[in-house]
Image (tube, rainbow, N blue to C red):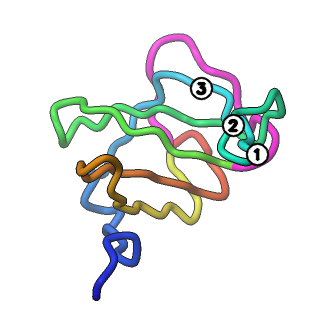
Amino acid sequence: MLNIRDLKIDPTSLGEKMLLVEIIPAYEYKEGAKTNNISGYRYVVALPKHNLEKISVKIDGEQLMDKPEGFVEVEFENLEVLAYEMRGNVQISARATGISLA
C-alpha cells in the first residue's frame, strides 16, 4: 500500500518567491517529549503564489541568518516538501540544508 510519506511535492509548486517572515527554534524530541535542546531552526516564509499562506522550512544546525526588518525574499538549498497524515488530516512539512537572500 502506498504511504503518503513516500510522496514528495515538487518545491517549484510553492512559487518563485518566498518571503521570510519569522525564524523560530526547532527543539529535539526524545521518546515523544520535547527537550530543551535546539536541533535547528524553522524559517517561516509567506508564499505570494498562494495568497501569502505560510510554510515553515526546517534546517538542522545553527541559525543561518537573522530575521531582517520587514520581509525579504529568500532561497533554500536542497528544499524538500513532504506530506504526512496526523489525526486524519494531511499536513505539509518542508526541510532544506541552507538558506540565503534571493
Judged left or right of residue 26, residue 12 is left
Q: Are marks 2 and 1 in contact (CB under 8 Å)?
A: yes
Q: CA distance from mark 2 to mark 1?
A: 5 Å
- Residue receiving disc 2: 33
Q: Residues within 10 Å of mark 2 (few under 14, many from 20)?
A: few
Which stretch appears magenta? 60-74
From the image, give the main secondary structure of the stretch colored magenta.
Answer: loop
- The quadrant in which residue 66 appears is top right
In the image, residue 59 above or below residue 4: above
Foreground mark, 1 or 3, reads: 1
Q: Earlier in the sequence, mark 1 or mark 3?
A: 3
Q: Residue at x 72, y 48 (%)?
A: 31
Foreground mark, 3 or 2, reads: 2
Amino acid type of the residue tagged 1 in the rendering: Lys
Which secondary structure, mark 1? strand
Q: Residue furthest front?
A: 31
Q: Position of residue 38 (x, y in %)?
A: 79, 34
Residue 66 on the magenta span: yes
- Residue receiving disc 1: 30
- Residue receiving disc 3: 23
Judged left or right of residue 57, residue 33 is right
Nearer to me, 23 or 7: 7
Q: Position of residue 44 (x, y in %)?
A: 47, 32
Q: Residues within 10 Å of mark 3 (few under 14, many from 20)?
A: many
Q: Residue at x 77, y 42 (%)?
A: 39
Judged left or right of residue 88, residue 18 is right
